[in-house]
Amino acid sequence: MGAEKVLRIGMIGSKFMGRAHSNAYVNGPRFFDLPMGVEMKQVAAQDEESLKKFAKQWGWESWTTKWRELVKNPEVDLVDVGTPNEMHRDQAIEAFENGKHVVCEKPLANTLPIAREMIKVAKKHKKQKAYVWFNYRRCPAVSLAYQMINSGRLGRILQVRCVYLQDWGGPETPLLWRFKKKHAGSGALGDLVAHSVDLARFLTGDDVKKVNGAVLHTVYKERMLLEGGGTGKSDVDDISLLLASFKSGMVASFEASRLARGYKNHNKIELHGEKGSLRFNLERMTELDFYDAELPAKEQGWSTINVSEAGAGHPYAENWWPAGHNLGYEHTFVNQFADMVNEMGGKKSLVPLPSFEDAYEVQRVLEAAVRSAKEGCDIPLSQVK
Ligand code: SOE
């Protein structure tokens, strides 16, 4: 029996995504029978003190404050880029050029030209995997929606409605990197609409043909500086609205806000087909609402599927708890990591994994929205390469 194959991880970033991804690396091998072992070899971040504590807490074998060391580390096979958006390009490209597989946080890049450069390098290293953390595909209810749509349960999809509302961005929030275009690329557009566009593409298998108008609205143009008093300029959108038409003829609306008081992480998508509708809301993550228009008219009504039943074949249910013992946000990352290891180990991923190509298509829509908002007109995606 040959030595067990092992996937050795190196991760850059130790904040919110660093924790979510570390949790996936710790729990993936515990809840899934993976075709390879997983070793958490090295983590990189800027601040040595907090990094040492983080590495110990999560069981990383080593740490470094120099990410360029990590991407060269011969004991690392997969580099996870979990840093602010402006760092994605350099870190992903250097990881590819050092022979590593890469998984990068969304959005891929701050601008379309940078995303194009990243895609080019990924294609040059096509033997190395290139994934993106569009984690909401693996809420079990979203994965079930994917399976139902692909089995024809809704028939032709006519309309998609996406809403992604949060409320942490009020005037009381200081000038974080997320409010500066040079660090984040955009505001709610790249941070939240990116997820919604990925979900719309993933669930329908369709692509945007045209952005039919967009509003990118910066409500608070000045924000308190993190230190030293005074204020600084915020130059990204706090609220993003856009309309899009897809190649199949389907139409879609995307709304996102960081100022929607009362909504904490309200990531919602509805799909209306000729044979029925589906409705998902992350705030009720275990549930998928289904309207079956194929039933006799007198029996039609919205039903709520509790997507946690292994016996029913619900996605990922056999890996977790008995029915009704609901999963949370962090499990979406564990499910994605397990599917990545499965695919890298020659097994099938339960639903398609988000690739750099997927993320590039999302970036094209974001760029088209920026142009549409600026020029006040429709922007065909054929003009946004
Ligand atoms: C902040 O808006 C944020 O952390 C996003 O960056 C994540 O992608 C989303 O999943 C939760 O909210």
Image (tube, grey):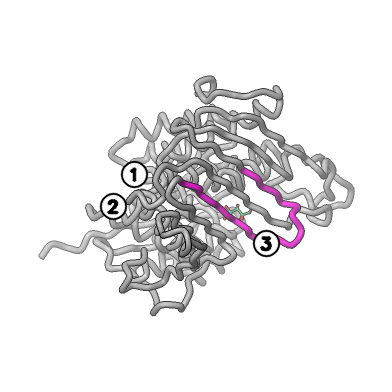
**Residue identifier under label 3:** 264
Q: Is residue 232 left or right of residue 86?
A: right
Q: Is residue 37 magenta?
A: no
Q: Earlier in the sequence, mark 3 or mark 2?
A: 3
Q: Residue at x 35, y 63 (%)?
A: 39
Cβ atoms at labels 3 and 1 below 8 Å apart? no
Cβ atoms at labels 2 and 1 below 8 Å apart? yes
Pointer 2: residues within 10 angstroms few (<14), some, or many (20+)?
some
Q: Earlier in the sequence, mark 2 or mark 1?
A: 1
Is disc 3 placed on a helix, strand or loop? loop
Cβ atoms at labels 3 and 2 below 8 Å apart? no
Residue 52 appears in which quarter of the rendering? bottom right
Q: Position of residue 118 (x, y in %)?
A: 46, 33
Part of the protein shown in magenta: 254-273
Q: Is residue 316 left or right of residue 161?
A: left
Q: Is residue 157 left or right of residue 34?
A: right
Marks 3 and 1, Cα distance to the nearest angstrom? Answer: 33 Å
Q: Position of residue 372 (x, y in %)?
A: 65, 27
